[in-house]
Image (cartoon, rainbow, N blue to C red):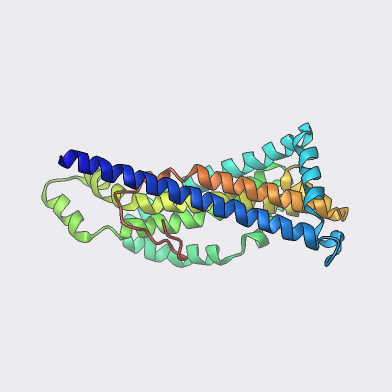
């Protein structure tokens, strides 16, 4: 009897979750459809199409792009620089954070310098990176890695330092060596912070790559958008913006399964107010 009751509760919970998802998606589609309808109404009536274009003109430009091999070449360039910058920035952030977080004196010595470097706007460093590495793929990768590195580094350090000292003491009393302490206590304690930082820095890597393409490049979606702006083609500018936003959305959704890994942990609040 009790098993039947539990099964009924699970089924009702599953139905409620499906209903909530359907309502959320319906609301999202409704907001998008309403925005497009308002855009179409005001374009050419209240605002000149030169400034905001129109939905049908942007749709035509997107169709032309998607049917062109040249567009997919530029998209591959942007995605490559984003992926490589994300992986390099995340790897460096975690690799430097672990030894420094375990040595508090060393971290306090270098912390001001990391904060100073983090406070420098990455956009301001774009021309410097392009001067050093040229207009190819390298400066876009460096910019994307720069956007990722500091967020991953700071939150990895924070995750390690949030592990209760009592757990570390108990592990040592029970005979655990440094490797056992790291594997059984530090890694599980810091993992939610690391994964949350990775999740929010994936779009940041895209921003870094596109910033590099805007500053100086002859390839990439950012280059296509900048070229359209230079020719006063508003539809091309908006189409490029929509493509970049869609890519960022898809990349962010691809990391949503990380939330399932963190179900055993309480909510984590990142530096800057982001929660997971």
The answer to which of 172 and 33 lies nearer the viewer is: 33
- Percent position of residue 37, x then y: 73, 56
- Image quadrant where one finds the N terminus: top left
Asked whether, in this view, residue 141 is left or right of residue 136, the answer is left
Picture residue at 51% right of the left edge, 42% below the top: 254
- Given residues 276 and 51, the one toward you in this image is 51
Question: Does residue 38 appear in the picture of this structure?
Answer: yes
Q: Residue at x 50, y 52 (%)?
A: 23
As drawn, the residue found furthest toward the top would be: 69
Q: Residue furthest left?
A: 174
Query: Front-most of 104 and 228?
Result: 228
Q: Say left or right for 75 vs 179.
A: right
Q: Position of residue 228 (x, y in %)?
A: 83, 51
The spot of residue 84 in percent (x, y) is 57, 41
Left or right of 164? Residue 124 is: right
Residue at point 11% right, 52% down?
A: 173
* Residue 125 vertical position relative to residue 70 in the rendered view, above or below: below
Q: Image point 22% across, 43% down: which residue?
A: 6
Does 180 appear above or below 99?
A: above
Relative to 268, 148 lies left or right: right
Q: Nearer the viewer, residue 44 or 258?
A: 44
Q: Quadrant of the C terminus?
A: bottom left
Rendered view: 45 above or below 148: below
Query: Can residue 209 be seen from the camera position used here?
Result: no
Total labels: the figure holds: 0
Q: Position of residue 205 (x, y in %)?
A: 58, 50
């Amino acid at each position: 009897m009790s098993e039947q009751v539990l099964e009924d509760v699970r089924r009702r919970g599953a139905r409620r979750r499906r209903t909530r998802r359907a309502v959320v998606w319906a609301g999202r589609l409704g907001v998008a459809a309403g925005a497009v309808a308002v855009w179409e109404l005001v374009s050419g009536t209240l605002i000149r199409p030169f400034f905001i274009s129109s939905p049908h003109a942007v749709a035509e430009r997107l169709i032309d792009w998607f049917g062109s091999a040249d567009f997919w070449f530029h998209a591959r360039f942007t995605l490559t620089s984003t992926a490589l910058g994300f992986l390099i920035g995340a790897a460096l952030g975690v690799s430097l954070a672990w030894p420094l977080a375990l040595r508090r004196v060393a971290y306090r010595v270098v912390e001001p310098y990391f904060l100073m470097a983090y406070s420098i706007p990455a956009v301001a460093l774009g021309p410097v990176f392009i001067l050093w590495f040229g207009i190819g793929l390298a400066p876009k990768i460096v910019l994307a890695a720069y956007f990722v590195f500091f967020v991953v580094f700071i939150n990895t350090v924070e995750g390690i330092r949030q592990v209760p000292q009592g757990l570390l003491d108990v592990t040592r009393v029970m005979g655990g060596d440094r490797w056992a302490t790291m594997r059984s206590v530090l890694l599980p304690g810091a993992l939610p912070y690391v994964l949350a930082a990775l999740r929010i820095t994936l779009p940041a890597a895209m921003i870094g790559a596109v910033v590099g393409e805007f500053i100086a490049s002859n390839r990439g979606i950012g280059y296509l958008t900048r070229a359209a702006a230079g020719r006063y083609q508003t539809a091309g500018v908006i189409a490029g913006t929509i493509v970049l936003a869609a890519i960022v959305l898809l990349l962010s959704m691809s990391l949503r399964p990380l939330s399932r890994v963190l179900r055993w942990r309480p909510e984590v609040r990142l530096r800057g107010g982001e929660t997971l």
